[in-house]
Image: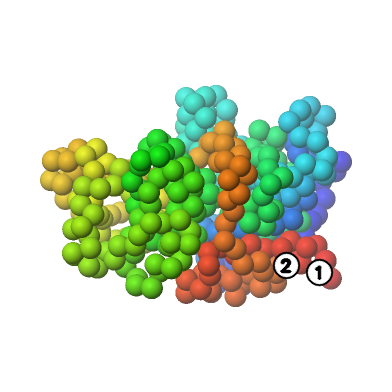
Amino acid sequence: MTERKVKAYAATSATAPLGPYPIKRHQLRDHDVEIDIHYCGVCHSDLHTARNDWNWTVYPIVPGHEIIGKVVAVGSKVSHYRLGDTVGVGCMVNSCGHCAACDEGFEQHCHTGATYTYGWPDSSEEGGITQGGYSEKIVVNQNFVLRVPDTLDMAAAAPLLCAGITTWAPLQEAGIGPGSQVAVVGLGGLGHMAIKLARALGAEVTLITRSAGKEADALRLGASKVVLSSDAAQMAAVANQFHLIVDTVPYAHDLNPYLPTLSHKGKLVLIGYLGPLEPALDSVVMIMGGRSVAGSMIGGIAATQQMLDFCGQHGIGADIELIRMQDINQAYERMLASDVKYRFVIDMASLRNAG
C-alpha cells in the first residue's frame, strides 16, 4: 500500500479559516492500523493550535485528536485488530516505549517526548509533522489504537478520547469511589464529563460555578448540588468537604477560595489551564490542612482503554452536537462564546462526500 493523498481540513495560518487541504498519509507499516475516520470531536486544543495561541504551530495544520472510525487495513504484524473493528485514536500516536514513564503506562509523560496526534515532529509524515483527525483516514501504530465498545454510540464516544480520559485520570489517581466527595469547577466539555464519570464511580458530586442557572443541567448530568463560587456563604458551607476538586477552567483564575473546601489531605487538580497561576497560592491553607494542588493531562493508553471499557459498561458518552466538516469555523466561534452543550463532533461523511 503506497503513500497517498486523502481529504482533510487544515489551517494554513493563524488568521486563515480552516478549509480543504489534501494531505498524504504514510505507507502502512508492519505494526500499523489504517482507519477510516467516521467521527472526530472538536477540542479547545484544536482551536488553540489552529490559531497558534501557544506559539508552536507549524502550518499547514490538520487538527483533531478525538477520532473514532473503522479498521480498513492492517500491517503484516498487527495482532490486536481486525478489519471492521470500531476503534479510536486519542491525543498520542507514539512514544519511546522504554523510558520509566512509558514502562509505567504513562506514555503522555514520555521522557523523550510523546508524539502527539497533530502538530508534532514525525519524520514519517508529510512535512515532518503529524496531522490529525479532520481527515478521511489516519494510519497509526496498533499500540496507540483503542478498542471502542460496541455499546457506545460512535459519535458520542469521540470526545472520550480527550475530554473523557483527561477527567478520568485524576479520578483514578485519587481512588475515587463510593463515599468520595468530588467537586467539579466549571461546566463545559471537560466539566460535564467529570461529573458523569465521578458519579458513575459512586462519588457524590458538587458543581462549583461562578454562573447561576446551571443547576438543572448539573443535576441531570449527575451532580447532587451546585455551589456558586461568588457566594461566600455557599463556599463556607462546603468547607473541609471535598476529597478531590477537578478544576476544568481554561484560563488563569484564583484558586485560593477553593482550597478551604478540600478535606484533610484533599487535592485540587488542574486539567483545563496551562500557564502561571495568578494570584499566587496561599500556602498556609495548604500546609495547615495537608492539602495540595496538582496538574494532570490526559492518560496513558492502558488508562484510556480502561476508561472506554468503563464508559461502555455504564453507557456513558459525551453530550454532543453533530456538525458538518464545512461548519468547523462557525463551531470554533461558538466554542469561544461557550455556545455548545457540551462538545462538537464532526460527521466525517460530510468530508468524504464533498466534491
Numbered tag placed on residue 20 in the rendering: 2
- Mark 1 sits on what residue? 354
Task: Let me know if residue 210 appears in the view.
Answer: yes
Q: Amino acid at mark 1?
A: Ala
Quick one: label 1, few (<14), some, or many (20+) residues within 10 Å? few
Instruction: Give left or right: position of 297 versus 79.
Output: left
Q: Relative to residue 80, is residue 156 drawn left or right?
A: left
x, y (%) of residue 323? 67, 69
Residue 49 placed where, x, y %?
A: 53, 59
Gap between marks 2 and 1 measured at Cα: 10 Å
Badge 2 amino acid? Pro
Q: Nearer the viewer, residue 156 or 330?
A: 156
Helix, strand or loop under label 2: strand
Q: Residue at x 43, y 68 (%)?
A: 216
- Labels 2 & 1 near each other (Cβ < 8 A): yes
- Compare marks 2 and 1 and give the one earlier in the sequence: 2
